[in-house]
Image: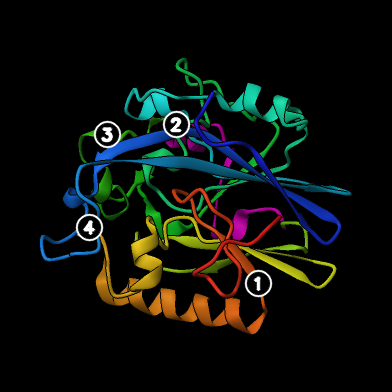
Amino acid sequence: MTRWPVQKIRVGALTATVLPLGEISDSLRDWFAPEAQAVPDGVSHLPVNALHVGGPGVSVLIDACDPPRYRGEGHTAEIGPCLRMAGIDPAGITHVIITHGHHDHFCGLADPRGEPTFPLARHILSPLDWGDGTLTAEAQRADGKAADPAALEHLFRLGLLDLGGSAPPLPPEISLIDTPGETPGHRVVRIASGGEVLFFLADLFHIRAEIDDPNLCPIWADDSALKASRSRIMAAIRNETARFLCSHIPDLFSTAHRSNARS
């Protein structure tokens, strides 16, 4: 089990289930420039969140980590049992959205033998993070020695990885927004139903300090592209009175993003 609970968030007729599959324990001082005063000292513990969106005719998973395959961290929960404990049938998932090519966002998509975790699902990745049968170097830059594109390479060989126009249509309630900066192909996911909107921002922000100061960027990012993406998405969130989640922050945020929203 993880130290963070599973959260269920109603978005109109849909239910968004936040699945904390594990954690990353690291010194955030290694992620940002030395002069970044808002970054906490010492080791920080960040959740590794996936998001399932379910409802009538909808079963879509956004990102899928298996932390033991990522860094061998503690407090882990394998994605299959975690889904079933949350009342979600893994066999019913039709689409898996991979927000970008960082290993902690896709390493749960195949088992140690290379067999797909979701063999009946289509897996969607931006072509900007892919080239010549594997992830681009730019997509893997933040992973360092942890980079291992094997799961995606296997899905690609099996014809289960969809790039660009080859992907089957997502349910109309779910749309992808290109937000380069963290990687060239990084995407945000917008979920809308019954007049309610939820954004899954993936790694647009990693920690609260970046939300408070959008000029604070990790050292591996394309600063100008990331700042432009953040500005555009936060404007959309405000305009739609939306809520938002991030991959490595445990809270659900309202439009007034300095305070948490209730689900």
Task: Determine which residue is flagged by label 3.
Answer: 146
Query: What type is the residue that disc 2 sits on?
Result: Ala
Q: CA distance from mark 1 to mark 4?
A: 29 Å
Residue 177, x across and y down, in percent: 55, 69
Task: Determine which residue is flagged by label 4.
Answer: 220
Query: What type is the residue that disc 4 sits on?
Result: Trp
Q: Residue furthest top?
A: 113
Q: Quadrant of the C terminus?
A: bottom right
Q: Secondary structure at mark 1?
A: loop
Which residue is nearer to you in this view: 84 or 9? 9
Mark 2 and 3 residues: CB-CB less than 8 Å, in contact? no
Q: Nearer the viewer, mark 2 or mark 1?
A: 1
Question: What is the magenta range?
Answer: 151-169
On screen, 116 above or below 211? above
Task: Determine which residue is flagged by label 2.
Answer: 151
On screen, 81 above or below 167? above
